[in-house]
Amino acid sequence: MHLYRAHVLVCAGTNCSLKGHRAVRDALTREIVGRGLGDEIKVVETGCFGLCEQGPTIVVYPEGVLYCRVKAEDVPDLVGIHLLKGRRVDRLMYREPTRPVAVQTVPELDYFRKQVRVVLDNCGVIDPDSLEEYIGHGGYTALARALEDGPARVLAEVKASGLRGRGGAGFPAGLKWEFGAKAPGPIKYVVCNADEGEPGTFKDRLILEGDPHRILEGMAICGFATGARQGYVYIRGEYGLSISRLEHSIRNARELGLLGENIFNSGFSFDVEVRFGAGAYVCGEETALFESLEGKRGEPRIKPPYPTEVGLFGRPTVINNVETLANIPAIVNRGAAWYRSIGTDTCPGTKVFTLTGDIVNEGLIEVPMGMTLREVIYDIGGGIPGGRRFKMAQTGGTSGGCLPESLLDVPMDYDKLAAAGSALGSGALLVMDDTHCIVDVARVFARFFLHESCGQCAPCREGTLQLHHILDRFTAGRGSREDLALLGRLAKTMAGASLCPLGQSVPLSIMTTLKHFEPEYLAHIDDRACPAGTCRPPAGGMKPAAAGNGRRGY
Amino acid sequence: MSVALEKLPSQLREQRLKEVDQVILRHRDRPGALLTILTEIQDLFGYLPEATFKPVAQALGIPVSQIWGVATFYTLFNTRPRGRHMIRLCENAPCHIQGTVAVLEAIQRELGIAPGEDTQDGEWGLELVSCLGICGVAPALMIDDQVYGNVRPEAIPAILDSHR
Amino acid sequence: MKDQVRLTIDGREVRADRGSSILAAARDAGITIPTLCHHPDQRVKALCRICVVEVERSRTLQAACAFPIAEDMVVRTRSPAIREARRTVLELIIARHPLDCLQCARNLHCELQTLAERMGVREANFHRLDSSIELDTSSPSLVREPAKCIVCRRCVEACQEVQQVGVLFPMHRGADTVVGTAGDRGLLDAVCTMCGQCSLICPTGAITEQDHTRQVWEALGDPKRHVVVQTAPATRVTIGEEFGMEPGSIVTGKLVAALRRLGFDRVFDTDFTADLTILEEAHELLHRVKEGGVLPLITSCSPGWIKYVEHFFPQLLPHLSSCKSPQQMFGALAKTYYAERAGIDPADIHVVSIMPCTAKKFEAGRPEMTASGYADVDAVLTSRELGRMLREAGIDFADLPEEEYDLPLGISTGAAAIFGASGGVMEAALRTAYETITGSTLEVLDITAVRGLDGIKEAAIEAGGLVVKAAVGHGLGNARRLCELVAGGAADYHFIEIMGCPGGCIGGGGQPIPTTNAIRQRRIDAIYQVDRNMPIRKSHENQVVKTLYAEFLGHPLGEKSHQLLHTHYQPRERYPA
C-alpha cells in the first residue's frame, strides 16, 4: 500500500460542487502533478463536509487545516505555501463568526467541537466511491459481527439502543424491526426511505452522497435481523448524484460478496435495488412510497394494517429512513450502552440537522439529541448574518412548527419539541430574520401543501385549497376576521380527520405562525398593512402556477 | 429535450417506438415497473407521448387510464411536449426567503413565460417545484439535470445563456 | 359462534365479531354513523372522512368504516370535536360542488345532498372555489359532469375492478384530483362499454344517463306520431322503487297502467321478443351443434357485453349469437309486422323502450339497427328516466290499477320474464332446447344451478343423449374470465350466457338508485316469482310468437328472421386512439 505524506480532501457534496469544487480539484491535481508531487500528495473527493455556506471547502491532512471558499486561482498558493513549505494560507482559513481569528485546524472549530459525528463519521473524510476506503474506516465490520452474533442479538442491541426512526415520526426502530422479524411469511422486504422531500432537508442526500456503503450495510443488517433477502432504496428522481453513487456502491459491494448470495459464507443472502420517485413529496409517507414502488399513484394506504404486516407487494416490510439505517453499523459495532450515552434518555443518539435560511453557517451538522435550539443556531450555526434580528426558527421543515425567540432554549429532541408545539421531524432547521413577513411565509407553506397533497381524502384535498386561498387573501390585503376563524376550523379538521400524516401535519406550521405572531396577521387583516413590508397588495408574491390542460381550475 | 412523437415522419416514429419496446422489454418482468418504464420513456422523448402508452399497457396488462393516472400524479412527468430546456425553480420556504420571487421575476423578464408555460420557440419551459434538497445554497433551481445554487436574479441571463 | 370482542361505543358495552369495523359494530348496536364514500358492496375507501369517530388513546380521529375494533376499545361517535370535523369536511366538499341541485338529475336522490340535509349544513362558510372542468356529453348513454365529482372513487372500483373495463381512473393530484379518462377523452372515445355501472354507484350527479325524456315528451305530444312502448323484463320488478316501494315489488300491471296514462298509443312488452329471441337462439345453438359451427355459442342480448367483446375479445365475435337483442327485435317488428297489421305507416311509428340499461341507448343508435328501413328503436328510457316522467306527470304509481299489455306484441311467457336476471336467458333457452331436441315435455322447469349472484355458474343438461354444457357469467369482470377460457380453448361449453351488469338486467346501469347486491337479490327473487305466476313458462309455447312465424317470419333462422332479427358485430380498438 502506498503511503502519502499529505491528503487533500476536496468536498464534492452537491452544495460545494455547485460552488465550483471541480475547478478546484482539477487545479489541485494539475498543480500537484506539475510539481512532481503526485507520489507524495493525494487528492481525495469526499462527500459533504457540512460547511456548505463556506464552500468549496478543502481540508489538508495530516494537520487538518480547513480552507474555505477556495477558488482555482488559490491553488498555486495552497500547493506552494502549504504543501511545499508547510505554512498555512491565512487568507483562505475559516474564521469563526464569534471570534474573527483564523482557526487553525478542524478540531479547533466551535462548529465541530459541539458536534458528535456518528452518522456523518465518514462524510467529508472518505472517498464515497471507494469501497476500500469505507472498509479502511471500519466498514462492513458491523455486518460481519451481526452475522456472527445472530439475528436475535442484533435485534436486542438495536432495541436496547433506543434508536428512534429519523424520518420524522420517531417510532422506535428496534420495535419496528421486531415486528418485522415476527411477521410470518417466506418473503419480506427492507426498504430504505430516501424520498427526502421535506423543504429545508438535504441530509439524506448528503449522507447517501458522502457514505453510501453505510446505508447498504445498515440495510443488510436489517435484512439479516428481520429475515428479509431483498432491499429497495426508494430515492427521489431528482437526486442524480446520490443515485449514481448508490448504484456504483451496490455494484462494488456485490463484486466483493458484501451483497448478494451467501454473504461472508454465512448462508445469508441479501441484495439491494434502487428505485426512483418521479416528483411527489407524499411518497415520503411509507405506504405511499410502497404504492409508488409498486408503480402506482403515490397515495397513502389505510392503516392498519401496518407495513410490518402488509407492506411492499403485500409482504411484511421494514421501512427505515436513510439516517436511521446509517446509525445501525455504529450501534452494532459499539453497542447499545455506548449509543445511549449520547443524547437524551427518551431520544438517544445524535441527530443530523440541515441549517438553512438566515443563518451564517448554512449546511449539514450532527449533534447529540437534546441540544438547545439556541446552541445550534448560535454556537454551531454562527447566528444571524448581517447584524439582523432573529425572528423565528422552524424545526422539522414545512410540516414542523415555527418557534419564536422566547422558545430558543428548547432542547431539540422528539418529545421536547413536540411539547413546545413544534416537531423534530426530518431535522430541517430554517431560521428567519425580521425582514420577512410571517404571513407571506405561511402562504408559502400552504402553497407547498396545495402542491403536494395527494388529493385522496377530502379534508386534505379541499382543506389545502381553502388554506392557501385564505392565506393568499391575507397577503393580498383582502383577508377578514372570518377567514381567521376558518383557519382555525380547517386546522382542527385537517389535523384530526385527514387520512395520512401529510394532511394531519399541514396545519402545524401555519397555526404556529398564527399563535406566535398574531399581531402581524391582524395588521394584514385590520390595517391592510404588512409590517415587514414584503407583501405587495393586491397580488404580491407569486401567482399560482397556471393549471394544466384538463385539470380542475380554481 | 422534447420531441413531439406525433409530428415525426412515420418511419422515424416507428423507429422511436422500437426504442420504447426495448425499455419495456428491459423492465416488464420486474415487479412494479411502471414508474421505471415511464421515467425511461420520458428520458427518450422529454415527455410521455401517448402513443407509447399502448405498448406499455399491453406489456403490463393494465388499462391506459391507469398509465394516465400515474403520469398525471407525478410532477416530473409531462404528458405534453415541454420546452427543450426545463427550468425547475424551487418555491418552498428556505428558497423563498432567500429570494425565489426575484429570481422568478428575472426568469420571466428573460423568457416572457409564466410557471407552467413554455416559450413559443419551444426552447424553454418553466415550472415552480417543491424542495429540490439543495436548500444549503438557496435559492436553488435546476435546468434539465443541472443544479444551480445561491442564484441571484442578475445571474439569470448568464445561466440561461450557458444552456443556449 | 364467531370470535367476538367487547368494546364500548358511546358509553354502551357492545359485542361484535373480531375484525369488524367500528362502523359495522356501531350499526349492529343501533348507532348510526354518517358516511359518504362508503358502499356496502365495495372495498373500504375511507376517503371522505365523514365517518370519523374518537378512539380512546388515538392521537387523531379515526374513520369508522376502516378502523378495526379491538378488545376493550373505547369509541365515541358523538362529541363536539367529531361534529365539527364532519361538518367542516362536508362544507369543504360543498364549497367546490355546484349548487345547481334544482337542475340536477340526482336532485332529491343525491347522497351528498341527503347528508347535508341530515347534518343540517345550511351555511356556506368556506370560499366558493368552483371547478371549471367541462361536461362530457359525447357518449350516447352517459353524461359525465366532473365538477360534481366528489372523488369517492366508487365508479373507479366499479369500472376497473368489477367490470374491468378500465375507463375511469383518478387523474392529477391534490386539489386537481378528479376521476377522468385516458387523456381526458370523452366517454365515446374512451373504450367505454356504456354499461352505466358508474352512474348506478355515483353518490352525486357526476355521472348520469343521457336523458331521453324530452324527446319522448315531444313524441307523446305529437298527434301525428303513433308512439309505442316496450318494457324490458327487469323493469317490472324495479320501477316501484322509483316511487318508494320495497325492492322486489312486482309492478307489471301498474307499469302498463302508468305508461297508458302517460299517453303511449300501445303498451307492448319486450318479453314478447325475449320469447322470440329464445326461439331464434335455441335454433341457432342446435344448428351450430349439428353442423359443427363455432361453439360455444354466446348470448348477445346485453349491449354493454357486446361492446365489451368487440373491444377486448374481437377474436370471439364468431362465438356471438347473431340474434339482435329483444329490444332491437321488437323495434324491427314494430315497424314491419305491427305496422302492416295495424295499417300504420312505419315512418309515423315511434318506438320507445323502457330499459334497465344505459348501453341500450348506444345499441339503439348502432347504424346496423335499421333493417326495417327506419331506426328500430327511436328512444330509450332507463328505469330512472321513466320514474322522472311519471313523477312529472303526477301519476301516483303505487295507487294505479293493474292493467294488461296490448295485443299482439304484449304477450309473453315466464321464460321471457327471467331474462331480467342473470341465468335467465340460459334457463329459458334450455327449456326450449330440451323440448325441441327431445320432443318430450320438460317436467322440472326450474334450473336453479344457473340462478343467483355467484360470478360464474355452470350447468349440464342431458337432452336426448346430448349433454348440453352451459355457463353463465354476469358483470364484465366475470365475462372476462369466461372469455379468457374460451379464447384459450379451455372451455368445453356449448352455450354461454353473459350479461354485462352484475346480477343481470335487474342490476343494470339504468336501474333505480340505490342498487346494492342485497337489493339485486330481492329483485331476482321477484323475477322468478313473475315466472312462477305465468300460465305459460316456455317461449316456444307463446301463441303469438307461433302466429308471428306462421303469418310473417316463416320459421326460426329463416330469411325474414335473418333480415330483421339478426345482426353482425364489428371489432373495435382495445386502446383509445
Image: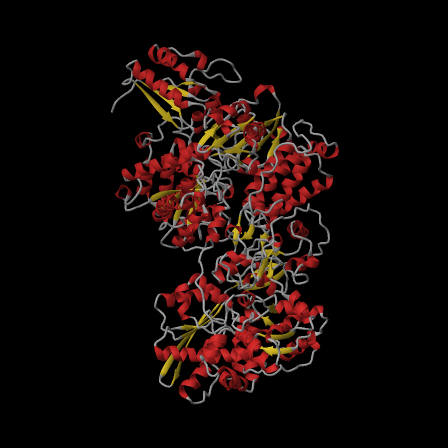
Q: Is residue A391 visible?
A: yes
**Residue A233 spot, x, y in % from top left:** 40, 42
Q: Quadrant of residue A12?
A: top left
> In the displayed structure, does residue A536 sit left or right of residue C528?
right
Name, please, the residue furthest toward the left.
A1
**Residue C251 spot, x, y in % from top left:** 63, 77
Q: Is residue A370 positioned above or below A309 on the image?
A: above
**Residue C12 spot, x, y in % from top left:** 63, 61
Q: Is residue C315 positioned above or below B135 on the image?
A: below
The number of numbered badges drawn on the structure is: 0
Q: Which of A202 and C322 is in front in this view?
A: C322
Q: Which of A255 and C324 is in front in this view?
A: C324
**Residue B133 spot, x, y in % from top left:** 48, 33
Name, please, the residue furthest toward the bottom.
C440
The colouring scheme, among rainbow, by chain, secondary structure or one colour, is: secondary structure
Q: Which of B104 and A417 is in front in this view?
A: B104
Q: Nearer the viewer, residue C498 or A314?
A: C498
Q: Is residue C529 visible?
A: no
Q: Is residue A394 positioned above or below A456 on the image?
A: above
